[in-house]
Amino acid sequence: MKKALFMLSVTLFTRMLAAQEIDLASLQGERWYGLYLNGHKSGYSMTALSIAGDGAVTYTEDCRFQVTMGGQRQDMRSLTTRSYASNGALLKVEAQVDDASGRSLFSGKVEGDALRFTTKVGGTAHTEMLPRPSETLTDMARQLRLLGGQAKIGDKISYRAFEPAYRKEFDGHSAIETIEERNLEGVATKVFKIRSAVPELGVETVSIVTEKGLVLEDTVAGIMVMRLEPKEMAQDVQYSNDVLVSNAALLDAPIEKPGNLIELALTLRGPLSERHSFHDSRQALVTPADGGPFSFSSRRLAADAIAPLTLPLADIPEDVLPWTKPSTFVQSDNAKIVAKAREIAGDEKDAFAVASKLCTWTCANVRSTFSARLSNALEVLENPEGDCTEHSVLFVGLARAAGIPAREVAGLVYTEAPRPGFYFHQWAKVWIGTWVDMDPTFGQPLVDPTHIKLSEGDLLQQTQLISIIGQVRVEVVHKKYDTPGTADPEK
């Protein structure tokens, strides 16, 4: 859930910028917005536009989430600044994330035809040269570009935007859907409804904008609303919304002894799509042909059915190789992580046995607590506490350090606390001749059937969950247990 909050904050980009040929004077200064997650006040955002004497433009967006998770107050801040030259060229983009563990930094500065990009995560800095983004001030001005001239319903425009947290530039498009008049402070004002989409992120934003470019409201992925408010009103956040409970798929009755399940069948309703549909040896999520609910079925894999595979692994498939490498948040080449992985593995050479030991060790040694953090493996190793995101990112780092391909997985899982239902959760998969799901939070080397995988991969792939947070409903259809006599009223 907290990673989803971070992903939402980095997709709340480019609201009020204008093309050079458009007068920006009316948009200078600060604007304050209240942030509402599925109808609950969850934070606030401040946007600021400034123009220097030489015509250079700086745009800042400061998002702060103040929520409750499992009864604990959690704060997270995402601050992004973009700078453009007087000719509209991108000069630099900087982002920082402040959370319970400290500050993560992402900074890109254009140097010739390249972007010098520096990340500082978990106290470790890394600098690399990336291709120069093609984004310009004109790209960021997509809304006012649409509103210029004789704007009409159906007008479309394309744009590009570099997102530092992803180290990548994305293509997007915007279109005018409706035009109407509203009474704003006693004045009849023409307003436009603009729908913007970034297909690779799977996120759409619906904006209500005046013809002068003032954003009155943004709705991101159908769940996050950013609404223009006076500063004092925007900052009035009461921590009253527990995002874990309010965004869970709660059940009327608990699932008895979920750890003893060997099969489970569910019906899922909500804004799911093909991008959430995963099929493997453990689960099947079937897309309805007639627009009806999704059908989910899963089974618990048996350890003795996994073929032995000896470390170091040989002949790793090409599509698996990317999941052997270190990354910004999974520092599997760090000496401390490598040493810990070797210590845990000991003399064991069987890949499944080593992965199981890493899973069990992570569960036993990372103290479970809810924390609003942009997690990374090294930081969790040095400060071993957190929730499912901390457990999974450390486990993935240890697995890769041990020579086992691993990646993060996200979706829903059943738990009885604080109320019986399916909650957003993160776990992991390891490749040991085949991909196998492991949950280091629950200490399950083979996950139970209540794990509903809806996304797998890194931060980019997990944006697939943004549009469904708090909107999935689950109905139990069938359960099968390995313990004779276990109650199963649906059987």
Image: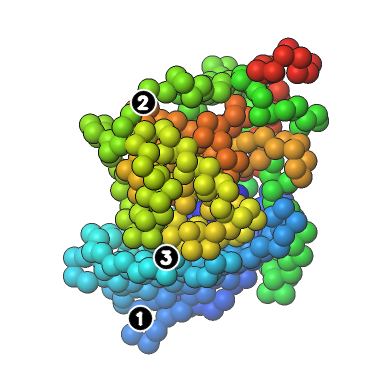
Looking at this view, name the residue that lies furthest to the left: 112
Image disc number at residue 121: 3
Which residue is labeled 1 in the image? Answer: 55
Q: Which structural element holds mark 2?
A: loop
Q: Which of 282 and 68 lies nearest the eye of the viewer? A: 282
State if disc 1 and disc 2 touch (CB < 8 Å): no
Question: Which kind of residue does numbered mark 2 sit on?
Answer: Pro
Residue 119, x across and y down, in percent: 36, 66
Which circle's residue, 1 or 3, is located before the other in the chain? 1
Q: Is residue 206 above or below residue 45?
A: above
Question: Which kind of residue does numbered mark 1 sit on?
Answer: Gly
Image disc number at residue 252: none
Q: Residues within 10 Å of mark 3 (few under 14, many from 20)?
A: many
The mark total stands at 3
Q: Is residue 94 above or below residue 444?
A: below
Q: Is residue 297 above or below residue 161?
A: above
Q: Residue at x 38, y 39 (%)?
A: 348
